[in-house]
Amino acid sequence: MLYLDRFILTTNASRMSYPYNILRPKKLQYIDFSPITIFYGSNGCGKSTLLNIIARKLGVEMLDRGNDSEALQPYINECKYKVTAPFNQHCDLPEESRFIRSEEVMHGIIKVRQHNERIKQHIRNANPELFDRFFNSKDDNVGYVWSADRWIYHALEKYKDARSNGELAFDYFQDNIVPETLVLLDEPENSLSPKFQKELAKMILDYARFFNCQFIIATHSPFLLAIQGAKIYDLDSTPSEVRDWTELDNIKLYAELFKNIEIK
């Protein structure tokens, strides 16, 4: 599915401040999108800045607004975009479209941990014996624990297992990516192991194919760059251009690393 068809960047050369000084050397007059479009590049290349500009121009939901500057809004005002067709009479894009930054995912992980700690603290204060049995027992089959305190009973039902950041991050994407929307992701591979990066790549491809989602992603994860059919803009090249993932410098570094390694 294609909701956003083209984004037209400003050609104003009179300003020298951020983000003009970051994006002008890329010589990108416009970006044409596919169902999965990826901005690739090294740290500081402007891929997150570009995502932020697109998200703000489109007015999609974003919990973390990222970097800001005095010239950012004027730059955004000078940009234009073209949608495939108005989504409905009220807006150009689906209302549940999202921009999910890596910082937002980490905030979500922290909220889960804080939620769990509040539950544990209450139970520790209300019933130390029950707390010790449920949280400190070496028995893997503790099962349900009875308590006359109804709050404890419901709290234990809501308690989420203390899992790794990567597992919680993957859960965050599953909970917050909605079918039939435009989804912008800023370095979603942060906190994810290679296994979960591969799972996320499959999830993105499935949502684009079967659930009418369009993705715009800033990443340097080889698993995401290798998504079948993804259109990749190489922001490390000047001028920036569309490349196959096997042509990217970071992928060549990975290939060189593993070239002479015999996997046992």
Image: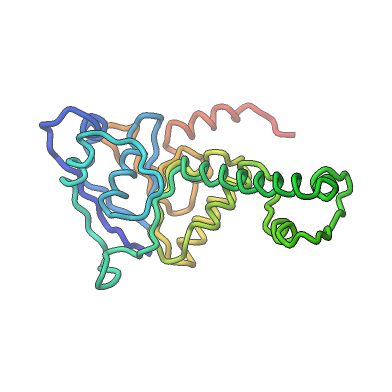
Task: Tell me which residue sits at (25%, 73%) in the image.
Answer: 89
- Residue 31, compared with residue 155, is above or below; it is above
Residue appearing at x 39%, y 46% in the figure: 38
Q: Position of residue 137 (x, y in %)?
A: 86, 45
Viewer-proximal residue, 231 or 96?
96
Q: How is the image coloured?
A: rainbow
**Foreground pick, 117 / 39:** 117
Q: Quadrant of the N terminus?
A: bottom left
Task: Identify which residue, 219 or 164, lies in the foreground.
Answer: 164
Residue 136 coordinates in the image, percent (x, y): 83, 43
**Residue 128: quadrant of the picture:** top right
Q: Is residue 196 above or below residue 84?
A: above
Where's residue 42, x and y in %? 40, 30
Residue 133 horizontal side relative to residue 197, left or right: right
Residue at the image point whose x is 71% and y is 46% from the top: 120
Left-right relation of 161 to 137? left
